[in-house]
Image (tube, helix red, strand yellow):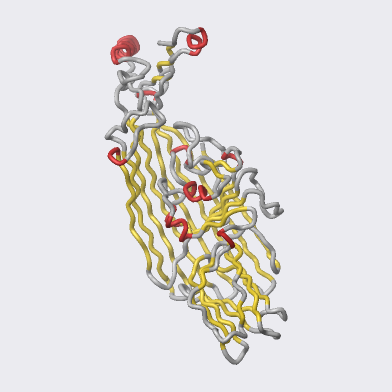
Amino acid sequence: MKKKIICAFALLSFGFAFSQETSSKVFGRLKGISSEVTVKIVHLPTNTAFETKSNSKGQFSLDNLQPGGPYKIEISDGSQVIYENPNVQLSLGNNDLPVVDVGSKEKTIDEVKITSKKTSVKNGVGISQAQISGLPNINRGIQDVTKLVPQSANNSFNGTNFRYNNVTIDGSINNDAIGFSPSLGGQTGTSGMPGSSTRSNSISLDAIQDVQVYIAPYDVKLGNFLGGSINAVTRSGSNAVTGSMYVYGRNATITGNNRVGDNSKMPKDFSDFIYGGRVGLPVVRDKVFLFTNLEYTKRTDPVFYNAGDPNALVSEGVARQISDFVRNKYGFNVGSSNQYNNFSESSKLFNKLDWKINDKHTLSIKNNTVFSQASNLERDGANFRFSSMDFVQKNAASTTTLELKSRFNDKWNNNLVLGYSSIHDYRDPTSGNPMFPQVEIAYNGGNDLARERQGGHCF
């Protein structure tokens, strides 16, 4: 099936308006002054400057700033700099500066890291890039980050189904439009997002800058969810060339027993590896910046409850008897009944181009493309399937977002986000004859009436 989504969202903010963000806001108050002063904030990695005036009470604010930093803050009275802080980090959304006493003799603070109080936003949680880097991200996905939210449990918020969530990346909707859960084993951490049917994350975690999670914001500007609103923004390039290469992996040697199946030791074929890299650089210094991230993942999951295994539904002899009968009678190969491995793999490419048009307007163009596929053979204590029942789920998802941030004056700001998403989700059977009918055989059901009616199934 093919699903295409087009979404556009424009937000006009005024003064101290609060809203879901793709940028940072700064609020501050100066103590010890009775007249207007100039507040200048410079994003040092891109040398982008923002200026505003404090009011008669010493209050000031700036909107549409890029999350992260460091930023340099200068406060001047027209003739000289009366306060300077060269190391300020901003989180996504609102940032409250400590009160600055400009009447004090100490004009410079060595380091102040500014975040929302207790890394939280109103009715939610804000998670910075520094926190993301320090988390034990086993699956390297957004679901590993949202675990910091107390109301979260495996992509469910406040006990609601994952289909009630709303996920946005750089302001563009990133939901599974149809709402299918993964084909293998039901819900996983990727459920509710594109690529969940192939058990793939919809974006590389190394491309994420900040994340916000709202539960019940009571804000008319936020909607389209009853569970959680997950809002993420991506990294950007800078004047410095920065990057990283990474490999994450595990195999059966460092993995515990199979808690979902029969508690047996993980077979040696199990493996889960992630390879990737990112780079940010200037295309035109102080003007145009590029960020790119490439990631490849590959996981192999051995299937349990194979014919002849302990606690398996059928023995090797029964499986061979069925296989021989179907082959001799109908000329169809039902496939393997023994050891079988499921796989999932994905290739992710993220590109972002930032253009500082002038001091008032900044344009960003981003594209996130993911190609993924996964096999889906399931066996358990009540159901046995030959390998011809397997199929490969394939997904190709691409999202392009254009964002224009404008700051007209100290009171009026505008943020325009246009997004286009294309998702192609389909299945490829692995059977030699996809038209051969599916046959269910009741076998080895049990002694009581309920078990006999339920029975076991052999496909």
Picture quadrant where residue 76 is located: bottom right
Percent coordinates x, y for residue 193 in the rendering: 52, 44
Q: Return the residue found at the far bottom.
A: 79
Task: Determine if residue 406 is in view.
Answer: no
Report the number of numbered marks: 0
The residue at 37%/63% (across/down) is 243
Q: Is residue 439 left or right of residue 410?
A: left
Residue 351 at least partly seen: yes
Q: Residue at x 70, y 52 (%)?
A: 218
Placement of 174 over or under 19, stated as above or below:
above
Q: Is residue 258 above or below residue 150?
A: above
Q: Nearer the viewer, residue 437 or 129?
A: 129
Q: Can you give x and y, in whole percent of width and height, for residue 389 in the image? A: 39, 24
Looking at the image, the residue that sits furthest to the front is: 105
- In percent of width and height, residue 341 lies at 32, 31
Residue in the foreground of this view, choosing between 102 and 406: 102
In percent of width and height, residue 201 lies at 45, 46
Give the residue drawn at x 48%, y 11%: 451
**Which quadrant: the C terminus?**
top left
Q: Is residue 254 above or below residue 389?
A: below
